[in-house]
């Protein structure tokens, strides 16, 4: 069934009042408009009338969808490719720092074309990587010899097994949200870490661009998180947020795309300026950046 409007309780806290707050256009594929609905209690947002898992596939078919195609077409995607080298190293260092381990069992959910899985595997980690898109799995196989598994393998993985589970801009795409979080708790070791990176709709760049904020990315992004909502959502599944880290570069990438969506054409100077201003404002307000990394551990 599609994710619809106000008749359904909040998926995060169960509150009954979920109301539309804005309408956002799918700029990447269809040109369709989708309402964004917000829980009046916890602030958790969903994309209304989003296609279900069986029908959302066509909304990912675009040469510009970089996580599935690995495209470098266009300046924005080229900048993404260049920045990826830096961010991969950052992610690896983050995991080494928080786990105090140089190797272990790692699960990546939503591996795309396999760059992070490859980085961690070369670093000595035992990596299991899941990816729903068959095309992306094939690119990973051809590019790096990686064997990525379909996402439904999550439910077959052994309990109490992984030292680390990562989702880099993936949770917002997952239709079976509660089932996924339940299984993360099941397969994590009691001293393990769940690392989730998601866009933050309370960031300064999100407030500046409003419905043109590129990280809404409807209908592919089914959910839209605030720090408050994320903590409540994870706590409901026996997972406690122990730290939050900023993703500084995301403000630039998102602002460049948002400029294009808002004004009908790329404005590199304005996009970079808004990205920089967003980060400055976020730094002044406690690192409330365009995207945030939530580090969580099992409560029990």
Image: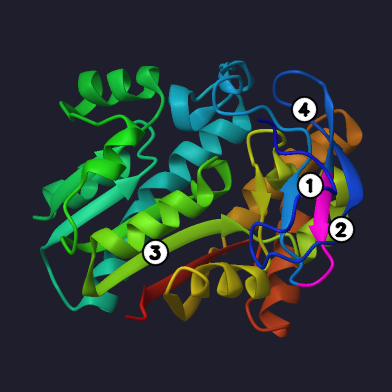
Give residue 213's mark.
1
Is 286 located above or below residue 60 in the figure? below
Is 1 located above or below residue 62 in the figure? below
Give residue 27's mark.
4
Foreground label between 3 and 2: 3
Tell which circle, 3 or 4, labels the residue nearer the N-terminal end.
Answer: 4
- Specify whether residue 268 is in view: no
Kind of element beneath mark 3: strand
Residue 45 locus on image (x, y percent): 74, 55
Closer-to-camera residue (8/269): 8
Magenta segment boundaries in residue numbering:
36-41
Kind of element beneath mark 4: loop
Q: CA distance from mark 3 to mark 1?
A: 24 Å
Tell which circle, 3 or 1, labels the residue nearer the N-terminal end.
Answer: 3
Q: CA distance from mark 2 to mark 1?
A: 8 Å
Is 120 located above or below residue 295 in the figure? above
Left of 83 or right of it: where is 102? left
Left of 110 or right of it: where is 16? right
Question: If the image is split into quadrants, where does the N terminus sit?
Answer: top right
- Specify whether residue 16 is in view: yes
Please give the name of the residue rendered at 20% of the width and 52% of the height, measured from the top-left corner. Answer: 120
- Majority secondary structure of the magenta segment? strand
Q: CA distance from mark 3 to mark 4?
A: 29 Å
Q: CA distance from mark 4 to mark 2?
A: 18 Å
Question: If the image is split into quadrants, where does the C terminus sit?
Answer: bottom left
Residue 277 locus on image (x, y percent): 77, 66
Question: What residue is shown with label 3?
Answer: 195
Please give the name of the residue rendered at 48% of the width and 69% of the height, measured from the top-left corner. Answer: 294
Q: Are marks 2 and 1 in contact (CB under 8 Å)?
A: yes
Tell which circle, 1 or 4, labels the residue nearer the N-terminal end.
Answer: 4
Q: Is residue 256 magenta?
A: no
């Amino acid at each position: 069934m599609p994710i619809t409007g106000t008749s359904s309780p909040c998926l995060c806290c169960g509150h009954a009042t979920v109301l539309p707050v804005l309408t956002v256009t799918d700029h990447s594929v269809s040109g369709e408009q989708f309402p964004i609905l917000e829980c009046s209690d916890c602030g958790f947002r969903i994309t209304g009338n989003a296609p279900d898992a069986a029908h959302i596939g066509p909304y990912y078919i675009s040469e510009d969808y970089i996580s599935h195609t690995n495209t470098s077409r266009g300046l924005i995607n080229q900048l993404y490719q260049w920045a990826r080298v830096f961010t991969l190293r950052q992610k690896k260092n983050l995991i080494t720092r928080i786990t105090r381990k140089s190797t272990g069992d790692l699960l990546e959910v939503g591996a795309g074309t396999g760059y992070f899985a490859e980085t961690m595997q070369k670093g000595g980690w035992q990596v299991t990587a899941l990816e729903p898109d068959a095309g992306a799995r094939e690119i990973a196989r051809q590019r790096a010899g990686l064997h990525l598994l379909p996402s439904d393998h999550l439910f077959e993985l052994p309990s109490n097994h992984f030292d680390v589970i990562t989702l880099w801009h993936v949770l917002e795409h997952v239709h079976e949200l509660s089932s996924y979080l339940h299984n993360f708790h099941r397969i994590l070791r009691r001293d393990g870490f769940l690392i989730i990176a998601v866009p933050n709709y309370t960031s300064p760049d999100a407030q500046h661009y409003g419905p043109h904020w590129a990280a809404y990315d409807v209908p592919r992004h089914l959910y839209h998180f605030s720090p408050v909502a994320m903590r409540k959502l994870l706590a409901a599944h026996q997972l406690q947020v122990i730290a939050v880290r900023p993703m500084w570069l995301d403000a630039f990438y998102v602002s460049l795309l948002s400029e294009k969506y808002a004004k009908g054409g790329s404005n590199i100077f304005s996009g970079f300026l808004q990205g920089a201003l967003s980060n400055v404002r976020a730094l002044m307000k406690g690192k409330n950046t365009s995207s945030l990394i939530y580090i969580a551990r099992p409560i029990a």
